[in-house]
Amino acid sequence: MEGRTASGTQKATSLGFPTVNLSYESKNVPDTGIYAGALIYDGEEYPGAVCLAPNGKLEIYCFETIPFTHSKEVSVAFMKRMSDYINGSDDEMKEKIARDVETAKQFFVDSEEKIG
């Protein structure tokens, strides 16, 4: 999916998982949930965990810190759906995000092993 970086509510950041938020206009949207995926920014691919919420909010937590600017054209690749989206207490969300991030990291480790 293609879109523009946008300001978010900083909720994920307050839980220890800063994300890049995207605004998009795509009609071809995958199911809501959490995915292993990547942000494609300035020709570089940054793996991470992608969240597509029921309200249409799209954000990605990249495993490495990236310098980015708001209102920049980017793409997000959805590689594997890992879990459902939930909305819970801060503690529940923090635990779920941590599990999803670890699952996404393992997806990339496993993918490298299959390719290499």
Image (cartoon, rainbow, N blue to C red):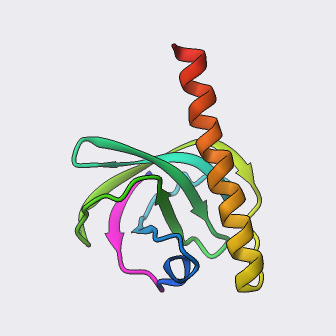
In the figure, residue 34 lies in which quadrant? bottom right
Q: Whole-percent x and y of residue 71? A: 25, 71
Q: Whole-percent x and y of residue 59? A: 50, 65
Rendered residue at 53%/83% (across/down): 14
Most foreground residue, 54 or 60: 60
Which residue is most to the top? 116
Q: Is residue 106 above or below residue 3?
A: above
Prevailing secondary structure class for the magenta stretch in the rendered image: strand
Left or right of 87: which side holds 55?
left
Q: Is residue 75 above or below residue 43?
A: below
Rendered residue at 72%/48% (across/down): 82
Q: Whole-percent x and y of residue 60? A: 49, 60
Left or right of 99: which side holds 116?
left
Left or right of 95: which side holds 38?
left
In the figure, residue 23 lies in which quadrant? bottom left
Magenta segment includes 107: no
Most foreground residue, 13 or 34: 13
Q: Looking at the image, can residue 22 be seen?
A: yes
Left or right of 89: which side holds 50?
left
Rendered residue at 52%/57% (across/down): 27
Q: What stretch of residues is rendered in magenta?
A: 2-9
Q: Whole-percent x and y of residue 75? A: 37, 50
Please state the total of marks drawn on the protein image. 0
Magenta segment includes 3: yes
Q: Looking at the image, can residue 32 be seen?
A: no
